[in-house]
Image (cartoon, helix red, strand yellow):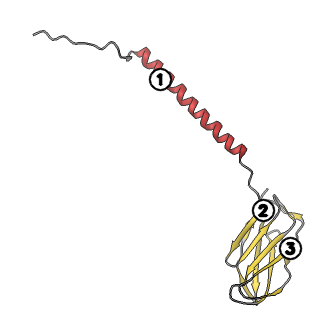
Amino acid sequence: MNVTSFRRTDTNDSPEMLLMFGKRFAKRVGAAASAAVVACGMVLVLTPSAQADGEWCNNQTCVKTYDTGTYLGRVEVSVWTQNRAGTTYAKVWTTSGWSANTGSQYVEAFRTYRGWVYPQRHFKAGTRLCAEGYKSGGKYGLPCVTITN
């Protein structure tokens, strides 16, 4: 019995064809990677930069800044009185040695005290700004934030 083997001639499995397929595949992968890099770059360019202004809270005390960068013109501190009425104020300070107290005020229960201090100066990047709320002699909350460029 005579067995004849047949070879398919319609496949592209010659070394030249495989090399051409590999080059085509590499070009497509390279193009996709380039497109991904460009897309990431566009996101970084078009996204607004991070702002230094914002509000940070800890327990019943919040500190809020209105300025960006290392300059602080105004800092607001709010203290939630919860169910304890009493004289309320806050102390604000930085790790670079600056500090100030807000004005004190009698605040009814279930109200929020708001006080402001005005540093009106630049601080070195990395300086910590902290605020501590006081109600009727007790300390409440200690939010801190790092000042960045």
Tell me whether circle 1 and circle 3 mark residues in contact (CB < 8 Å): no
Residue 104 placement, left or right of 19: right
**Residue 134 lies in what quarter of the image?**
bottom right
Amino acid residing under circle 1: Gly
Amino acid residing under circle 2: Asp
Q: Which residue shows up at 74% across the image and 55% down it?
A: 50
**Rounded to the nearest whole Å, what is the CA distance between mark 1 and mark 3?**
67 Å
Q: Which residue shows up at 85% across the image and 68% down it?
A: 74
Q: Which residue shows up at 63% across the image and 37% down it?
A: 37
Amino acid residing under circle 3: Val
- Per the image, the residue denoted by label 2 is 53
Residue 109 placement, left or right of 106: left
**Residue 36 lies in what quarter of the image?**
top right
Disc 1, SS: helix
- Disc 1 packing (10 Å; few <14; some 14–19; many ≥20): few
Disc 3, SS: strand
- Disc 2 packing (10 Å; few <14; some 14–19; many ≥20): some
What's the mark number on residue 117?
Answer: 3
Image quadrant in which the C terminus is located? bottom right
Where in the figure is residue 143, as x and y percent of width and height? 72, 73
- The numbered mark, 2 or 3, whose residue comes first in the sequence reads 2
Q: Which residue shows up at 44% across the image and 14% down it?
A: 16
- The numbered mark, 1 or 2, whose residue comes first in the sequence reads 1
- Disc 3 packing (10 Å; few <14; some 14–19; many ≥20): many
Residue 3 vs 108, above or below: the answer is above
| Residue furthest out toward the right | 120
- Per the image, the residue denoted by label 1 is 22
- The numbered mark, 1 or 3, whose residue comes first in the sequence reads 1
What's the mark number on residue 5?
Answer: none
